[in-house]
Image (cartoon, grey):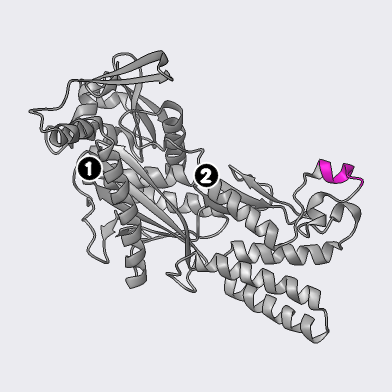
Amino acid sequence: MQKPEPSSIPASPGAYLYRDAQGRVIYVGKARVLRRRVLSYFRREGLSPKTRAMIGRARSVEFITTTTEKEALLLESSLIKKHRPHYNVALRDDKQYFLFRMDLKAAFPRLEIVRRPRRDGARYFGPFTSAIAARDTWKLLHRTFSLRRCSDRAMKNRVRPCLYHHMGQCPAPCMGLVESGRYHETVRQVCALLDGDAQGLLATLKAEMEAASETLEFERAAVLRDRIRAVERTVERQAVVMPGKADTDAVGLFEGGHGLALGIVRVRGGAVNDGSAFWWPGLTWDDASEAVLAFLEQYYAELPPPARILLPWAVPASTETPKEEGRAHRPVPQAGGDGAGRGEDADGDDGNFWAVLRETLSERRAGPVHLVGPQNDADGRLLDLARSNAREEARRRENHDVGSILDRIARALHLDGPPLRIECVDVSHTGGRQTRVGMVVYENGLPA
Protein backbone atom coordinates (compact mmCIF):
# COMPACT_ATOMS: atom_id res chain seq x y z
CA MET A 1 0.00 0.00 0.00
CA GLN A 2 1.19 3.49 -0.78
CA LYS A 3 1.75 5.94 2.05
CA PRO A 4 -1.35 8.18 2.35
CA GLU A 5 -1.07 11.95 2.13
CA PRO A 6 -0.63 13.27 5.70
CA SER A 7 -3.16 16.04 5.16
CA SER A 8 -5.82 13.43 4.34
CA ILE A 9 -5.53 11.84 7.79
CA PRO A 10 -7.42 13.43 10.73
CA ALA A 11 -5.32 14.69 13.64
CA SER A 12 -8.00 13.74 16.20
CA PRO A 13 -8.66 10.58 18.25
CA GLY A 14 -10.41 7.73 16.53
CA ALA A 15 -10.21 4.33 14.86
CA TYR A 16 -8.72 3.30 11.52
CA LEU A 17 -9.54 0.33 9.28
CA TYR A 18 -7.17 -1.22 6.73
CA ARG A 19 -8.86 -3.04 3.83
CA ASP A 20 -7.45 -5.49 1.28
CA ALA A 21 -7.99 -5.59 -2.49
CA GLN A 22 -11.41 -7.24 -2.04
CA GLY A 23 -12.53 -4.51 0.39
CA ARG A 24 -12.37 -6.78 3.46
CA VAL A 25 -11.28 -5.23 6.74
CA ILE A 26 -7.98 -6.89 7.70
CA TYR A 27 -6.94 -4.69 10.64
CA VAL A 28 -8.60 -2.24 13.03
CA GLY A 29 -6.66 0.09 15.30
CA LYS A 30 -7.20 3.07 17.57
CA ALA A 31 -5.15 6.18 18.23
CA ARG A 32 -5.05 9.34 20.28
CA VAL A 33 -3.76 11.15 17.17
CA LEU A 34 -4.79 9.29 14.02
CA ARG A 35 -2.35 11.07 11.69
CA ARG A 36 0.71 10.27 13.77
CA ARG A 37 -0.39 6.69 14.37
CA VAL A 38 -1.19 5.77 10.76
CA LEU A 39 1.98 7.35 9.38
CA SER A 40 4.03 5.21 11.80
CA TYR A 41 3.06 2.16 9.72
CA PHE A 42 5.08 3.46 6.77
CA ARG A 43 8.49 3.74 8.38
CA ARG A 44 11.26 2.06 6.43
CA GLU A 45 12.69 0.24 9.42
CA GLY A 46 11.56 -1.19 12.76
CA LEU A 47 8.28 -2.77 11.69
CA SER A 48 7.37 -6.21 13.02
CA PRO A 49 6.81 -9.10 10.58
CA LYS A 50 3.07 -9.01 11.30
CA THR A 51 2.87 -5.31 10.49
CA ARG A 52 4.89 -5.68 7.29
CA ALA A 53 2.61 -8.51 6.15
CA MET A 54 -0.50 -6.48 6.93
CA ILE A 55 0.71 -3.37 5.09
CA GLY A 56 1.77 -5.51 2.13
CA ARG A 57 -1.74 -6.88 1.87
CA ALA A 58 -3.61 -3.62 2.56
CA ARG A 59 -4.88 -1.48 -0.30
CA SER A 60 -6.75 1.32 1.51
CA VAL A 61 -7.32 2.81 4.94
CA GLU A 62 -10.43 4.46 6.40
CA PHE A 63 -10.90 6.64 9.48
CA ILE A 64 -13.67 7.12 12.04
CA THR A 65 -12.99 10.05 14.36
CA THR A 66 -14.10 10.30 17.98
CA THR A 67 -14.03 13.08 20.55
CA THR A 68 -12.12 11.18 23.27
CA GLU A 69 -9.63 8.34 23.64
CA LYS A 70 -12.23 6.33 25.57
CA GLU A 71 -14.61 6.48 22.61
CA ALA A 72 -11.77 5.34 20.34
CA LEU A 73 -11.07 2.33 22.58
CA LEU A 74 -14.73 1.26 22.64
CA LEU A 75 -15.14 1.87 18.91
CA GLU A 76 -12.11 -0.29 18.12
CA SER A 77 -13.53 -3.15 20.20
CA SER A 78 -16.91 -2.87 18.47
CA LEU A 79 -15.33 -2.90 15.00
CA ILE A 80 -13.16 -5.92 15.83
CA LYS A 81 -16.21 -7.87 16.95
CA LYS A 82 -18.07 -6.86 13.80
CA HIS A 83 -15.38 -7.50 11.17
CA ARG A 84 -13.15 -10.14 12.83
CA PRO A 85 -10.05 -8.76 11.04
CA HIS A 86 -7.31 -11.25 10.21
CA TYR A 87 -4.51 -9.28 11.88
CA ASN A 88 -6.35 -8.33 15.08
CA VAL A 89 -6.56 -10.11 18.40
CA ALA A 90 -10.20 -11.22 18.61
CA LEU A 91 -11.99 -13.53 21.05
CA ARG A 92 -13.51 -16.30 18.95
CA ASP A 93 -15.44 -17.90 21.81
CA ASP A 94 -17.22 -14.95 23.42
CA LYS A 95 -20.33 -17.07 24.14
CA GLN A 96 -18.69 -19.72 26.29
CA TYR A 97 -19.10 -18.02 29.67
CA PHE A 98 -21.82 -18.71 32.21
CA LEU A 99 -22.87 -16.65 35.22
CA PHE A 100 -25.16 -17.06 38.21
CA ARG A 101 -27.83 -14.39 38.61
CA MET A 102 -29.70 -13.62 41.84
CA ASP A 103 -32.30 -10.83 41.90
CA LEU A 104 -32.23 -9.71 45.53
CA LYS A 105 -35.13 -7.30 45.00
CA ALA A 106 -37.55 -10.19 44.47
CA ALA A 107 -39.63 -11.44 47.39
CA PHE A 108 -38.27 -14.96 46.80
CA PRO A 109 -35.13 -14.72 44.62
CA ARG A 110 -34.22 -17.52 42.24
CA LEU A 111 -30.69 -18.60 41.30
CA GLU A 112 -30.43 -18.62 37.50
CA ILE A 113 -27.69 -19.57 35.02
CA VAL A 114 -27.26 -16.87 32.36
CA ARG A 115 -24.75 -16.06 29.63
CA ARG A 116 -24.58 -12.29 29.87
CA PRO A 117 -25.05 -9.83 32.73
CA ARG A 118 -27.59 -7.03 32.44
CA ARG A 119 -27.76 -3.67 34.18
CA ASP A 120 -30.82 -4.72 36.19
CA GLY A 121 -29.56 -4.38 39.75
CA ALA A 122 -29.28 -8.15 40.27
CA ARG A 123 -26.20 -9.87 41.72
CA TYR A 124 -24.01 -11.81 39.25
CA PHE A 125 -21.43 -14.44 40.17
CA GLY A 126 -18.83 -16.15 38.01
CA PRO A 127 -17.93 -16.56 35.26
CA PHE A 128 -17.77 -20.29 34.60
CA THR A 129 -16.11 -21.41 31.37
CA SER A 130 -17.80 -24.82 31.51
CA ALA A 131 -21.55 -25.29 31.29
CA ILE A 132 -21.17 -28.64 33.06
CA ALA A 133 -19.25 -27.04 35.95
CA ALA A 134 -21.86 -24.30 36.26
CA ARG A 135 -24.73 -26.79 36.23
CA ASP A 136 -23.04 -29.08 38.78
CA THR A 137 -22.45 -26.14 41.13
CA TRP A 138 -26.05 -25.01 40.65
CA LYS A 139 -27.34 -28.47 41.57
CA LEU A 140 -25.06 -28.66 44.61
CA LEU A 141 -26.30 -25.29 45.86
CA HIS A 142 -29.93 -26.35 45.51
CA ARG A 143 -29.30 -29.64 47.32
CA THR A 144 -27.57 -27.76 50.12
CA PHE A 145 -29.75 -24.64 50.37
CA SER A 146 -33.52 -24.64 49.91
CA LEU A 147 -34.25 -22.28 47.02
CA ARG A 148 -37.07 -22.28 44.50
CA ARG A 149 -36.24 -23.50 40.99
CA CYS A 150 -39.43 -22.66 39.11
CA SER A 151 -39.87 -19.52 37.01
CA ASP A 152 -41.93 -16.56 38.18
CA ARG A 153 -44.79 -17.57 35.90
CA ALA A 154 -44.81 -21.17 37.10
CA MET A 155 -44.68 -20.01 40.72
CA LYS A 156 -47.75 -17.80 40.28
CA ASN A 157 -49.77 -20.57 38.63
CA ARG A 158 -48.85 -23.41 40.98
CA VAL A 159 -51.70 -24.91 43.02
CA ARG A 160 -49.68 -27.35 45.13
CA PRO A 161 -46.04 -27.75 46.17
CA CYS A 162 -43.65 -29.24 43.62
CA LEU A 163 -41.69 -32.47 43.94
CA TYR A 164 -38.58 -30.59 45.14
CA HIS A 165 -40.53 -29.44 48.21
CA HIS A 166 -41.31 -33.06 49.13
CA MET A 167 -37.58 -33.86 48.63
CA GLY A 168 -36.67 -31.10 51.09
CA GLN A 169 -34.97 -28.94 48.42
CA CYS A 170 -37.59 -26.17 48.12
CA PRO A 171 -39.44 -24.33 50.94
CA ALA A 172 -42.51 -23.88 48.67
CA PRO A 173 -42.85 -20.08 48.69
CA CYS A 174 -45.53 -20.60 46.01
CA MET A 175 -47.83 -21.97 48.74
CA GLY A 176 -46.80 -19.43 51.38
CA LEU A 177 -44.99 -22.07 53.45
CA VAL A 178 -41.95 -19.86 54.12
CA GLU A 179 -41.61 -16.21 55.15
CA SER A 180 -39.71 -13.84 52.89
CA GLY A 181 -37.30 -12.87 55.69
CA ARG A 182 -36.29 -16.46 56.42
CA TYR A 183 -35.99 -17.20 52.71
CA HIS A 184 -33.70 -14.17 52.25
CA GLU A 185 -31.46 -15.48 55.04
CA THR A 186 -30.86 -18.58 52.92
CA VAL A 187 -30.24 -16.35 49.91
CA ARG A 188 -27.69 -14.39 51.92
CA GLN A 189 -25.82 -17.60 52.75
CA VAL A 190 -25.76 -18.66 49.08
CA CYS A 191 -24.41 -15.25 48.06
CA ALA A 192 -21.74 -15.45 50.78
CA LEU A 193 -20.58 -18.82 49.45
CA LEU A 194 -20.52 -17.59 45.84
CA ASP A 195 -18.62 -14.48 46.98
CA GLY A 196 -15.94 -16.79 48.42
CA ASP A 197 -16.69 -16.11 52.10
CA ALA A 198 -16.84 -19.80 52.95
CA GLN A 199 -15.17 -19.45 56.35
CA GLY A 200 -17.60 -16.79 57.52
CA LEU A 201 -20.53 -18.85 56.30
CA LEU A 202 -19.21 -21.98 58.05
CA ALA A 203 -18.85 -20.09 61.33
CA THR A 204 -22.46 -18.86 61.08
CA LEU A 205 -23.82 -22.31 60.22
CA LYS A 206 -21.93 -23.95 63.09
CA ALA A 207 -23.28 -21.36 65.55
CA GLU A 208 -26.83 -21.97 64.28
CA MET A 209 -26.36 -25.75 64.53
CA GLU A 210 -25.17 -25.50 68.15
CA ALA A 211 -28.07 -23.19 69.02
CA ALA A 212 -30.55 -25.63 67.44
CA SER A 213 -29.06 -28.50 69.44
CA GLU A 214 -29.33 -26.57 72.71
CA THR A 215 -33.03 -25.88 72.07
CA LEU A 216 -33.56 -29.56 71.16
CA GLU A 217 -34.35 -28.77 67.49
CA PHE A 218 -32.49 -31.86 66.34
CA GLU A 219 -34.00 -32.05 62.88
CA ARG A 220 -32.91 -28.49 62.11
CA ALA A 221 -29.49 -29.21 63.62
CA ALA A 222 -29.13 -32.23 61.33
CA VAL A 223 -30.03 -30.11 58.28
CA LEU A 224 -27.41 -27.53 59.28
CA ARG A 225 -24.85 -30.29 59.87
CA ASP A 226 -25.37 -31.63 56.32
CA ARG A 227 -25.17 -28.09 54.96
CA ILE A 228 -21.83 -27.53 56.74
CA ARG A 229 -20.41 -30.74 55.27
CA ALA A 230 -21.51 -29.76 51.76
CA VAL A 231 -19.87 -26.33 52.08
CA GLU A 232 -16.67 -27.90 53.43
CA ARG A 233 -16.53 -30.31 50.47
CA THR A 234 -16.94 -27.38 48.11
CA VAL A 235 -14.10 -25.46 49.78
CA GLU A 236 -11.79 -28.50 49.68
CA ARG A 237 -11.97 -28.52 45.87
CA GLN A 238 -10.39 -25.09 45.65
CA ALA A 239 -6.76 -24.11 46.26
CA VAL A 240 -6.46 -21.05 48.53
CA VAL A 241 -3.69 -18.89 47.15
CA MET A 242 -4.44 -15.35 48.33
CA PRO A 243 -6.36 -15.44 51.61
CA GLY A 244 -7.87 -12.11 52.52
CA LYS A 245 -7.06 -10.52 49.14
CA ALA A 246 -9.49 -8.85 46.76
CA ASP A 247 -11.03 -10.79 43.89
CA THR A 248 -8.35 -11.12 41.22
CA ASP A 249 -7.95 -12.27 37.63
CA ALA A 250 -4.36 -13.17 36.69
CA VAL A 251 -3.12 -13.06 33.08
CA GLY A 252 -0.13 -15.07 31.87
CA LEU A 253 1.52 -15.26 28.44
CA PHE A 254 3.52 -17.92 26.61
CA GLU A 255 5.09 -17.71 23.16
CA GLY A 256 4.86 -20.98 21.25
CA GLY A 257 6.52 -21.91 18.03
CA HIS A 258 3.67 -20.61 15.89
CA GLY A 259 1.82 -18.06 18.00
CA LEU A 260 1.08 -16.45 21.35
CA ALA A 261 -1.03 -18.06 24.09
CA LEU A 262 -2.77 -16.27 26.97
CA GLY A 263 -3.98 -17.94 30.14
CA ILE A 264 -6.30 -16.37 32.71
CA VAL A 265 -7.17 -17.73 36.16
CA ARG A 266 -9.88 -16.31 38.41
CA VAL A 267 -9.51 -15.97 42.17
CA ARG A 268 -12.62 -15.32 44.23
CA GLY A 269 -12.49 -15.15 48.00
CA GLY A 270 -8.85 -16.23 47.98
CA ALA A 271 -9.53 -19.41 45.97
CA VAL A 272 -8.98 -20.26 42.32
CA ASN A 273 -12.43 -21.13 40.99
CA ASP A 274 -11.97 -21.16 37.21
CA GLY A 275 -9.62 -20.49 34.33
CA SER A 276 -9.38 -20.45 30.55
CA ALA A 277 -6.83 -19.99 27.76
CA PHE A 278 -6.69 -18.35 24.34
CA TRP A 279 -4.45 -18.79 21.30
CA TRP A 280 -3.52 -16.34 18.54
CA PRO A 281 -1.49 -17.89 15.71
CA GLY A 282 1.23 -15.77 14.16
CA LEU A 283 1.69 -13.41 17.12
CA THR A 284 4.99 -13.03 19.00
CA TRP A 285 6.23 -11.27 22.14
CA ASP A 286 6.45 -8.09 20.08
CA ASP A 287 2.64 -8.15 19.95
CA ALA A 288 2.16 -8.85 23.68
CA SER A 289 1.18 -5.37 24.83
CA GLU A 290 -1.37 -4.87 22.05
CA ALA A 291 -2.72 -8.41 22.48
CA VAL A 292 -3.33 -8.07 26.23
CA LEU A 293 -4.84 -4.57 25.90
CA ALA A 294 -7.27 -5.78 23.21
CA PHE A 295 -8.03 -8.96 25.13
CA LEU A 296 -8.96 -7.19 28.37
CA GLU A 297 -11.30 -4.72 26.64
CA GLN A 298 -13.14 -7.48 24.76
CA TYR A 299 -13.12 -10.05 27.58
CA TYR A 300 -14.72 -7.70 30.11
CA ALA A 301 -17.21 -6.24 27.65
CA GLU A 302 -19.66 -9.00 28.65
CA LEU A 303 -18.26 -10.17 32.00
CA PRO A 304 -18.07 -8.18 35.24
CA PRO A 305 -14.41 -7.29 35.93
CA PRO A 306 -12.90 -8.00 39.37
CA ALA A 307 -11.38 -5.37 41.63
CA ARG A 308 -7.85 -6.44 40.66
CA ILE A 309 -6.35 -7.66 37.40
CA LEU A 310 -2.83 -9.07 37.74
CA LEU A 311 -0.51 -8.74 34.71
CA PRO A 312 3.06 -9.96 34.07
CA TRP A 313 4.18 -6.32 34.03
CA ALA A 314 3.35 -3.12 35.91
CA VAL A 315 0.80 -0.65 34.55
CA PRO A 316 1.48 2.71 36.25
CA ALA A 317 -1.35 5.02 37.19
CA SER A 318 0.11 7.63 34.82
CA THR A 319 0.15 7.39 31.03
CA GLU A 320 3.47 5.59 30.86
CA THR A 321 3.72 2.30 28.99
CA PRO A 322 3.79 -1.00 30.88
CA LYS A 323 7.10 -2.03 32.44
CA GLU A 324 8.04 -5.51 33.49
CA GLU A 325 8.47 -6.16 37.20
CA GLY A 326 8.35 -8.96 39.74
CA ARG A 327 9.44 -12.54 39.13
CA ALA A 328 11.38 -13.91 36.22
CA HIS A 329 8.78 -13.80 33.47
CA ARG A 330 9.56 -13.38 29.79
CA PRO A 331 10.22 -9.66 29.02
CA VAL A 332 7.37 -7.74 27.45
CA PRO A 333 7.89 -5.11 24.71
CA GLN A 334 8.69 -1.65 26.01
CA ALA A 335 7.82 1.75 24.62
CA GLY A 336 9.79 3.38 21.87
CA GLY A 337 9.93 0.40 19.52
CA ASP A 338 7.68 -0.66 16.70
CA GLY A 339 4.52 1.27 17.34
CA ALA A 340 2.66 -0.23 14.43
CA GLY A 341 3.18 -3.74 15.66
CA ARG A 342 2.46 -3.24 19.37
CA GLY A 343 -0.26 -0.67 19.65
CA GLU A 344 2.17 2.03 20.83
CA ASP A 345 3.89 4.90 19.08
CA ALA A 346 6.02 7.92 19.77
CA ASP A 347 3.22 9.90 21.40
CA GLY A 348 2.63 7.18 24.01
CA ASP A 349 -0.69 5.86 22.72
CA ASP A 350 -0.24 2.54 24.46
CA GLY A 351 0.21 4.09 27.90
CA ASN A 352 -2.72 6.44 27.39
CA PHE A 353 -5.01 3.59 26.42
CA TRP A 354 -4.00 1.53 29.47
CA ALA A 355 -5.23 4.45 31.59
CA VAL A 356 -8.40 4.67 29.50
CA LEU A 357 -8.95 0.91 29.87
CA ARG A 358 -8.61 1.18 33.65
CA GLU A 359 -11.25 3.92 33.68
CA THR A 360 -13.56 1.93 31.39
CA LEU A 361 -13.36 -1.24 33.46
CA SER A 362 -13.97 0.74 36.66
CA GLU A 363 -17.17 2.13 35.16
CA ARG A 364 -18.34 -1.35 34.14
CA ARG A 365 -17.70 -2.66 37.64
CA ALA A 366 -19.18 0.45 39.34
CA GLY A 367 -16.06 0.47 41.49
CA PRO A 368 -12.28 0.80 41.16
CA VAL A 369 -10.40 -1.75 39.02
CA HIS A 370 -6.63 -1.94 39.54
CA LEU A 371 -4.31 -3.17 36.76
CA VAL A 372 -1.16 -4.21 38.58
CA GLY A 373 2.03 -6.20 38.22
CA PRO A 374 3.15 -8.81 40.76
CA GLN A 375 3.42 -7.35 44.25
CA ASN A 376 4.63 -10.39 46.24
CA ASP A 377 5.38 -14.12 46.03
CA ALA A 378 1.68 -15.02 46.10
CA ASP A 379 1.14 -12.86 43.01
CA GLY A 380 4.13 -14.50 41.37
CA ARG A 381 2.74 -17.98 42.00
CA LEU A 382 -0.61 -16.92 40.59
CA LEU A 383 1.08 -15.58 37.44
CA ASP A 384 3.02 -18.84 37.15
CA LEU A 385 -0.30 -20.69 37.23
CA ALA A 386 -1.76 -18.45 34.50
CA ARG A 387 1.38 -18.83 32.38
CA SER A 388 1.25 -22.62 32.85
CA ASN A 389 -2.29 -22.61 31.42
CA ALA A 390 -1.06 -20.54 28.49
CA ARG A 391 1.85 -22.94 27.90
CA GLU A 392 -0.50 -25.95 27.88
CA GLU A 393 -2.81 -24.18 25.41
CA ALA A 394 0.16 -23.47 23.10
CA ARG A 395 1.28 -27.10 23.34
CA ARG A 396 -2.23 -28.38 22.63
CA ARG A 397 -2.70 -26.10 19.63
CA GLU A 398 0.66 -26.95 18.13
CA ASN A 399 0.15 -30.70 18.67
CA HIS A 400 -3.11 -30.40 16.74
CA ASP A 401 -1.46 -28.50 13.92
CA VAL A 402 -1.78 -30.50 10.68
CA GLY A 403 1.90 -30.21 9.82
CA SER A 404 2.90 -31.33 13.30
CA ILE A 405 0.63 -34.38 13.12
CA LEU A 406 1.99 -35.42 9.71
CA ASP A 407 5.56 -35.04 10.96
CA ARG A 408 4.77 -37.23 13.96
CA ILE A 409 3.21 -39.89 11.71
CA ALA A 410 6.32 -39.84 9.50
CA ARG A 411 8.59 -40.32 12.51
CA ALA A 412 6.42 -43.10 13.96
CA LEU A 413 6.37 -45.02 10.64
CA HIS A 414 9.99 -44.20 9.73
CA LEU A 415 8.98 -42.47 6.49
CA ASP A 416 11.29 -40.26 4.45
CA GLY A 417 8.85 -37.35 4.73
CA PRO A 418 5.27 -36.44 5.73
CA PRO A 419 2.67 -38.69 4.07
CA LEU A 420 0.90 -37.00 1.16
CA ARG A 421 -2.03 -39.45 1.01
CA ILE A 422 -3.56 -41.61 3.73
CA GLU A 423 -6.27 -44.20 3.05
CA CYS A 424 -8.25 -45.71 5.92
CA VAL A 425 -10.26 -48.88 5.13
CA ASP A 426 -12.75 -50.76 7.30
CA VAL A 427 -14.68 -53.95 6.52
CA SER A 428 -17.77 -55.21 8.38
CA HIS A 429 -20.19 -58.09 7.88
CA THR A 430 -23.02 -59.96 9.58
CA GLY A 431 -22.10 -63.62 10.10
CA GLY A 432 -20.10 -63.65 6.89
CA ARG A 433 -22.92 -62.08 4.87
CA GLN A 434 -23.82 -58.54 3.81
CA THR A 435 -20.16 -57.50 3.66
CA ARG A 436 -19.59 -53.77 3.46
CA VAL A 437 -16.38 -51.81 2.95
CA GLY A 438 -15.81 -48.16 3.71
CA MET A 439 -12.81 -45.98 2.93
CA VAL A 440 -11.85 -42.40 3.77
CA VAL A 441 -8.93 -40.53 2.23
CA TYR A 442 -6.75 -37.71 3.55
CA GLU A 443 -4.46 -35.71 1.29
CA ASN A 444 -1.90 -33.36 2.83
CA GLY A 445 -3.54 -33.88 6.21
CA LEU A 446 -7.04 -32.83 5.10
CA PRO A 447 -10.11 -34.94 4.25
CA ALA A 448 -10.45 -35.59 0.51
Q: Does 43 lie within the magenta span? A: no
Residue 98 x/y as whole percent: 56, 46
- Region in magenta: 153-159
Q: Is residue 156 magenta?
A: yes
- Left or right of residue 426, residue 45 in this image: left
Give the residue type that dot 2 points to.
Tyr
Q: Nearer the viewer, mark 1 or mark 2?
A: 2
Residue marked by disc 1:
284
Note whether 190 is above or below 68 in the view shown.
Answer: below
- The residue that appears at 42% across and 26% down in the rendered structure is 83
- Density class for disc 1 (Cα within 10 Å; few <14, some 14-19, many ≥20) is many
Q: Which quadrant of the rendered structure holds the C terminus?
A: top left
Identify the residue at the far front of this view: 431
Quadrant placement of the N terminus: top left
Residue at (32, 46) in percent of width and height: 393
Specify the amino acid type for callout 1: Thr
Magenta span: predominant SS is helix
Q: Is residue 411 left or right of residue 365?
A: left
Nearer the observer, 88 or 41:
88
In the rendered picture of this protein, how many numbered marks are placed on residues? Answer: 2
Q: Are marks 1 and 2 in contact (CB under 8 Å)?
A: no
